[in-house]
Image: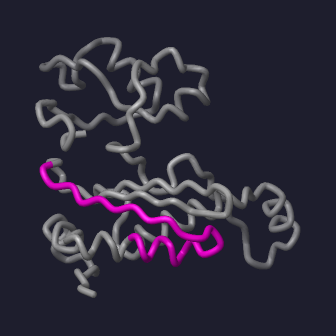
Amino acid sequence: MLHRRPDLKMIGLRGNLGTRLGILEKGLAPDGTSPLHGMVLAEAGLARLGLESHVKERLDTNWMLPAVGQGALGLECRADDNESQSMLEALDDEQTSQETRAERAMLAALGGGCLIPIGCLAKCQNGKLSLAAAVLDPDGVQRIAATIECPADKPAQAGKHLADALLQQGAGELLARILPDAPFRAESS
């Protein structure tokens, strides 16, 4: 957000959706000392709770990419529980699975996690997988972005290729400034 709108003052908010919307309704930051003029939330969460009326603007994914795996559900069971595995297989959506595997592979190749400013969006259509990703510094001053398109049947490779494209543009150095002890290294090809 700060890359696009450096004039904004951003604050972190904690709590469930009801708590956050209550804060917004009061119009004050949680500390009560500064005005709060807006809030960025996931539309999917609002829609799931029937609160779509709170959506005032949808952010364009050309500049605001979601977090890796945003909107996908991950279900696990014990490796030796064949009955549960069979039930879970029936719930698997292959397109969502391919998209999520590609996004997660990109994130893993960069050594990122949920606290690192990395966004990614994978879209699978007609046997093709399109991936877009961006790595930013916490202040939004620097943004490194890349996109690729490849066959959808190799999502892990696609994610790795996207990470490589980001690293070639300097994402490793940017990430190293954020987390100096992180295990990733900028590789040159």
Q: Position of residue 78 (x, y in %)?
A: 73, 72
| Foreground residue among 41 and 102 | 102
Residue 176 vs residue 97: left or right?
A: left
Q: Is residue 8 above or below residue 32?
A: below
Residue 74 vs residue 150: left or right?
A: right
Q: Is residue 79 above or below residue 188?
A: above
Answer whether residue 54 is magenta in the image: no
Image quarter where the N terminus lies is top left
**The quadrant where residue 146 appears:** bottom left
Give the color scheme: rainbow, by chain, secondary structure or one colour.
Answer: one colour
Answer whether residue 157 is magenta in the image: yes
Q: Residue at x 23, y 20 (%)?
A: 36
Q: Position of residue 131 (x, y in %)?
A: 47, 60
Image quarter where the C terminus lies is bottom left
Extreme-bottom residue of the structure: 189
| Foreground residue among 2 and 13 | 2
Q: Residue at x 17, y 67 (%)?
A: 174
| Foreground residue among 166 and 113 | 166
**The quadrant where residue 4 appears:** top left
Q: Position of residue 138 (x, y in %)?
A: 18, 52
Q: Residue at x 54, y 20 (%)?
A: 52
- Give, as a single range, the part of the protein colored magenta: 141-162
Q: How many marks?
A: 0
